Structure formats: C-alpha cells, structure tokens
Amino acid sequence: MTLGWSPKPLPPPLAMSPIGETATSALTETSTATTTTEPTPSPVPVQAASVTTPIAYRPHPKPGYPICKLRLECRDLTHEGAEIFISNNNITEDLLAAVAVVLSILYKPSQSNSHIPGTRSVTLILEASEGVAYTRGSELDNDHKEIHFSLDYISKIPTEPPSRRRNEIQGVLVHEMVHCWQWNGHGTAPGGLIEGIADFVRLKAGLSPPHWKKQKKDNWDLGYQHTGYFLDWIESKYGIGSVRRVNEALMNRRYDEEAFWMGLFGKQVKELRDDYCTTIPQDAPIGIEKAQKEPEKAQKEPEKARQKSKDQLEKVLD
C-alpha cells in the first residue's frame, strides 16, 4: 500500500573550517596580540630617605625610700591629751617626718629596697592607757603596724619651755616608728638593743628630752637612752653608718652576742662598753641642768630638730 506522505529532504550541511586551521588562526591572533600589546611596567616606588631619631637619654631613676600608708585613730576626742596632741602637731607632716628620719638613719635606699622591712601601713592610735607608747603588728599581719600612744601621758607632758610638748610627742613618735622599720634577728636580739636603737635614732634626730644623760652602767643593754648613748659613741668611734650596720646585721641572722659584735667591730661588746665608759666624766651633766644654764639654746633645739625632720622628709620625697 502506498502512503500519501514522503519525508522532506535534509538541509545542506554548513560550511566548516578544518579544526587545525581554526586553532592555528586563533593561536596566531593571540600571539600577535601578545606581541604587539605589552603592559606598561609600574614605576619603581621611590623610598624616602630614612631619618634616624636620636634616642633620648633616660637616666636610671634615683633610688628612693618606700612609702607606706599612714592612718590616725583617736579613741577619745574629748580627752585632754587629744586636744594637746592635735593643737601641738601638724599630724600628716609629723608622721611623714618620723618615717623619713627613721629610714634615712637606718638605711640607704636601693632600686629594690629588699633590705628594708616591707611595712605596708602604720596606724597611730591615740587612747587612754598606762605607760607611754608601744608598737605591735596589727591583727591583719605583721606588715601592718600599730603605734599605741597614751593620751594620759600626753596630758602630763610639761608645758615649759613652750616647745616641750611638741618636741616630746615627736620624739616618742620617732622612737616608736623605729620599731615599725627595724630588724630584730628573727626575734632573738636583746630587748635592750632593740630599744637602744630606737632611742639612738631619736637622739640623732635631735629629739632627746632634757632629762636624758650619759651614765656609767654595768650593763650595756639596759635599753632606751642608756644603750642609745652607747650606740651613739660607737657611731662616732667607728664611723657614720655603724649603727646602720648593727641593724642590718639583724636582718638575716639570729643574734649571737660574741660573734655578732666581733664580726662588726672586732671586739666583744663588754670591751666596747668599757671603752665607752672611759669617755664619760664622773659627773656627767644632766640634760635638764644644761637647759637651765642655757635656756635660749634649749628653746631653739626643738625648732632645729623640727627643721631637720623637714629637710629629711623633703630628701626622701624628692
């Protein structure tokens, strides 16, 4: 059977270039473009001439003494002693001066100050009590000190000469401040030596009271002014800084009397005491008698001591 439909003829093929020819032509065009068009090179950056900034000379900071926090606590503002203390003292200045004079006599500053006790704070507590004053570590730890000063004692300080009250108060503060900063041979040093160093510092600060006197005593370690004058003789005999050496020798060693004094001065302490006693007149003048003979000079001494404390304070804070 013959159908009435017949397929249409296919369209003629498109004209195609040979593959090799096309590739060669493309390569030629690319090559031509590459050859004829070269990229413009970037300009070489011009480096600015380096300027050397001279390094400023920085000297090492001058060693200074440590500064601790200072506090005041008065437990009875209505007490007569409190009124006397406040009216006769510039409290901030006097406490700073006490720290300054103690550190300047007992130590030389260094960059680390590791040879100075690490006292962090000192609290002065004014309270009604017996005696004069005492120092102890606080309940927090031993790096925080407390100075307990008797208001009853302050109220009984003589009023003549006019500067006597201020001089005595500052002298007691300096004595007690020594206990905040001195070494004690890990608790083995004699109490007389500890107290003698404190009164030696008070003596060197020009704050000795008029009743102090040099005396020939059998025991060198009676403490207070008796040992203080003995140490003052050692300082004059063996050179400035001798008592500083005594204090610093108590930093890392336990106290052994024979080895201690022989190591420092080449003599037993009893020999040193005998040498000291030969320098004391049989009837050594008592300080108060000198004050009576030279009243004008006696009145000027406390002012000199105050100025000396100020100078030492400025030196420490510089």
Image (spheres, grey):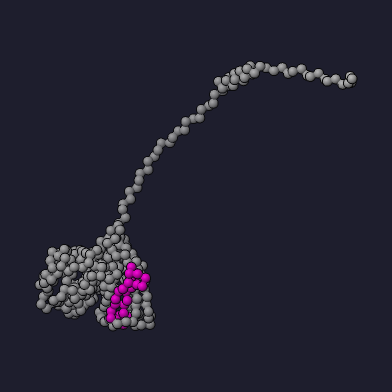
User: Residue 246's x, y, as percent?
Assistant: 20, 66
Whether 36 is drawn above or below 279: the answer is above
Q: Would residue 242 be visible to someone looking at this image?
A: yes
Q: Going by the image, does 91 lie left or right of 302?
A: right
Q: Quadrant of the C terminus?
A: bottom left
Whether 252 is drawn above or below 31: the answer is below
Quadrant of the image occupied by residue 99: bottom left
Of residues 48 and 15, the one nearer the viewer is 15
User: Residue 25's x, y, as percent?
Assistant: 62, 18
Q: Would residue 101 be visible to someone looking at this image?
A: no
Q: Residue at x 34, y 72 (%)?
A: 138
Of residues 184 and 297, the one nearer the viewer is 184
* Magenta residue span: 131-155
Q: Going by the image, does 284 lie left or right of 88?
A: left
Q: Residue at x 50, y 30 (%)?
A: 42
User: Residue 62's x, y, as percent?
Assistant: 30, 56
Of residues 244 and 259, the one nearer the viewer is 259
